[in-house]
Amino acid sequence: MPILNFHLAEGRHSAAQHERLLREGSTYYAEALDSPIERVRAFVTLHRPELVALAGVPGAGPAPYFTFLVLEGRPVEQRQRLLEGLTDLVVDVLGVDRDLVRGHCLRVEPQDWAIGGVPASLARRHEIQARAEQGELQ
């Protein structure tokens, strides 16, 4: 279920920077979640600069924002590590001020996420149970 999306203003960054975000973001995400890289989907979504406001001013400057999805039950430490690590990546790749970067972890209930049309609660039942049991033991 790993889905990662970087929202950027169009024309502010190069294609090479976009590619690096996609490659390194995917790798980091897979490692942080201990998930096969084959499950990761990553996107760079570009927005026209005049449709991106910073401090209420359209087109004022870089305002990178990222989101990522995780199934409910992932430990808070893991989610916070992703928020920090993906912020580090955005700062490193885009050369932006860390204080301008925003990130959001979206937690999804396994029964509300489909993998090949099958709810994750069924498709990943054993993984979800193992995570729940580890959480109970900690």
Image (cartoon, rainbow, N blue to C red):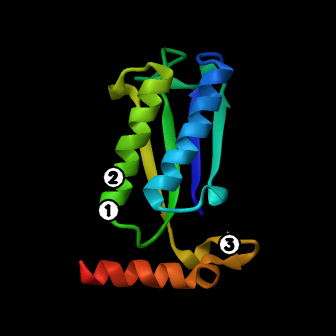
Q: Is residue 94 left or right of residue 97?
A: right
- SS at mark 2 in the image: helix
Q: Quadrant of the C terminus?
A: bottom left
Contact between labelled residues 1 and 2, with CB atoms less than 8 Å apart: yes
Between the C-alphas of marks 3 and 1, the distance is 23 Å
Does residue 15 lie above or below 21 as drawn? Answer: above
Q: Which mark is residue 12?
A: none
Tell me residue 28's x, y (percent).
49, 46
Contact between labelled residues 2 and 3, with CB atoms less than 8 Å apart: no
Q: Nearer the viewer, residue 44 or 34?
A: 34
Q: Nearer the viewer, residue 100 or 71?
A: 71
Amino acid tagged 2: Gln
Tell me residue 69's x, y (percent).
53, 57
Q: Which residue is mark 2?
A: 80
- SS at mark 1 in the image: helix
Q: Specify which label sits upstream in the sequence, 3 or 1.
A: 1
Q: Which residue is mark 3?
A: 114
- SS at mark 3 in the image: strand
Residue 12 found in image quarter: top right
Residue at image position (57%, 58%) is 2
Q: Which mark is residue 76?
A: 1
Between the C-alphas of marks 2 and 1, the distance is 6 Å
Amino acid tagged 1: Val
